[in-house]
Amino acid sequence: MKYTLSINNRVHQVEAEPDMPVLWVLRDLLNFTGTKFGCGKGLCGACTVLLNGQALRSCSLPISAVGDGKLATIEEVDRIAEYKKNAIAIKQAWQDNNVPQCGYCQPGQIMSAIALVSNNSRLDKQAIKNGMSGNICRCGTYARIEKAICSVAG
Ligand code: FES
């Protein structure tokens, strides 16, 4: 099937099976390799992208379910008007707080953080913890992630 996708406010046309996960459309067909594969089962959050402002697991999202939705990925999320301010602030906070260790899960962490901050006008520590609980980090950078989000959302 042919699909026309809006990714980072640009139009991309791809040919794929309807059940192909967006993760593999992004990585294998369009070379958006910033979105990572972790578990492939919707459990770790490494593959998180934004679809119409919501953080979703792209490993569990078939291309046929995207329709005319707007996808955003780690590569260019800070170029998109509705996310720009928070995306730049979150990425800066990640640097200021030296958040990453091995770094593998961090694109997914950052995309979830951008959605969390963009969709909530106020966030306390518990709300940040709850909002980020679906993103797993094997290095255990959770305290720095929460501190970074707090510095943007507080
Ligand atoms: Fe998608 Fe783990 S790779 S949630």
Image (cartoon, helix red, strand yellow):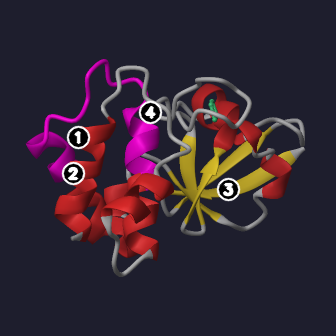
Label 3: state its secondary structure: strand
Report if the CB atoms under discs 1 and 2 are less than 8 Å apart.
yes
Q: How far is disc 2 from disc 4 in space, using C-alphas?
A: 20 Å
Answer above or below: position of 127 versus 41.
below
The front one of 123 and 72 is: 123
User: Which circle marks residue 144 in the picture?
Assistant: 1
User: Which circle marks residue 5 in the picture?
Assistant: 3
Query: Which quadrant of the figure has residue 70?
Result: bottom right
Q: Residues within 10 Å of mark 4 (few under 14, many from 20)?
A: some
Q: Nearer the viewer, mark 2 or mark 4?
A: 2
Residue placed furthest toward the left? 96
**Residue drawn at (33%, 25%), measured in percent from left and top?**
103
Answer above or below: position of 137 versus 68.
above
Nearer the N terminus, badge 2 or badge 3? Answer: 3
Write down the residue under mark 2: 148
User: Which circle marks residue 32 in the picture?
Assistant: none
Q: Residues within 10 Å of mark 2 (few under 14, many from 20)?
A: many
